[in-house]
Image (cartoon, rainbow, N blue to C red):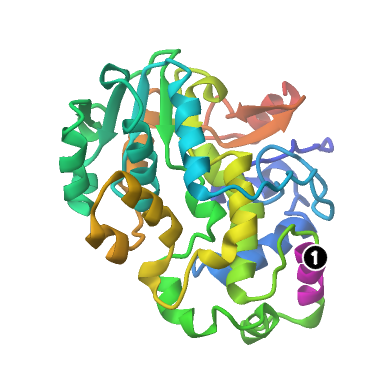
Amino acid sequence: MEILTLPIFAKVTPAFINLLPKLQQNAQLTADDEFLIQLNSIWSKDAGKTGYTNQPRYYKFDQRVSFDTTAEPIVLKPESLTTIVEHRAQEIVNKNNDIKLFWSGGIDSTLTVASILSIARTDQIELYHTCESIKENPYFYDYIQKFNVRTTMWSDRWDTKFKSDDSIVTGTSADEITGSLDRSFYDEHSAGLNQPWQVFFKTKGYNDSFITRCEQLFSESQSPIETMFDARWWFYFYIRHTNYARRDWDYNLENDFSNNVVQFFNCNTFDSWAILNKEQLIHNEYRTYKQPFKEVIYKYWDNKEFLHNKEKVNSLLSTHWILKKLARFDQQYLFVYKKDNEYRTFSPSQYPFVSLQDTLNSLKGI
């Protein structure tokens, strides 16, 4: 059997892991992959030695680098969050494209929508939501109506094809720059969020060599990694971020992702703010998680209940419609990889019924 050189993977799925032994008898995940699977399992009950990590060998954004080196660091600018939000919204509106705003009802997308509504033309915006968006944040939905913008229930229009000059705006990446702290993890570990991360890792059964490897990586962060929350923030910011950022490709299968999809929080100015202000992301109660975001929302929308009590909840319903759209347009992919400084998708012609020879032939053509 010929030796197969696997491409550089930006996404490793369970299907791919199961496929590896069929591709090549001795094929297996790299030591870096295994390390990140272990690191991922610290934060997720769903990942373990036999599980997978959504972000195996990428740092943030698109820099494909050896895992033991970091990409060029961004230049940190100490700007206020309000200023960053205002500039980002203005940047999007100034493109003069039709804006398709995706609103889940959560904190991140509410900040995105509030800032853009404050300056955009009414005829420039169409807001996409689901029934869960209204259920999660009904009073903000009432607020949206005051702007007389078009609103569309995406569950009724999930197979809509967007135009090539639409700007599809999402709140993606806010979780990843803020540590993606879900309620279940907080309830289980809140007492230890500010303890040294090494102590927490040892309680999870990780040995000194694993901790030393983490110390080497954490030392390259532009913000000190000292507590358990710091370590979680580091993992989502540097490792998981790119995978989640790529999810929005699936909103826009018919056009070019880089020209159409605009992820509000996925830019260097928000990265810089998160690096410099991660200690502000949560205080002594879960309802204070992302409090800086809620304070900026309050400047647009005067709702004290939201300001003081709104909590992060998982907004997963959109994923259901994305999967339906993928199936509808027959554009499923096995994984995404990077070549010649651009992303490409790879899907054997018989996917998901993949034969060994078909896969080998497909890889040869890359």
Q: Is residue 143 magenta?
A: no
Estimate the x, y position of residue 332 in percent, counting from the top left. 48, 31
Q: Position of residue 118 (x, y in %)?
A: 33, 33
- State the residue at coordinates (16%, 33%): 146
Magenta range is 210-218
Q: Give me the residue at 50% from left, 34% from top.
A: 88
Quadrant location of the C terminus in the rendered image:
top right
Does 178 sit above or below residue 282?
A: above
Residue 215 is a magenta residue: yes
Badge 1: residue crowd in 10 Å (few <14, some 14–19, many ≥20) = few
Question: Predominant secondary structure in magenta?
Answer: helix
Q: Position of residue 125 (x, y in %)?
A: 30, 23
Residue indicated by mark 1: 219
Quarter of the view holding residue 119: top left
**Number of disc labels:** 1
Q: Is residue 155 above or below residue 270?
A: above
Q: Relative to the observer, which residue lies in front, 2 or 88?
A: 88
**Left or right of residue 177, residue 59 in this image:** right
Asked if residue 343 is positioned above or below residue 94 in the image, the reply reads below
Q: Residue at x 64, y 57 (%)?
A: 276
Please tell me whether residue 309 is drawn above or below residue 172 in the rendered image. Answer: below
SS for tag 1?
A: loop
Drawn side of residue 324 relative to residue 168, left or right: left
Left or right: 306 as drawn, with respect to 319: left
Residue at 44% over, 74% down: 186
Asked whether residue 211 is in view, the answer is yes
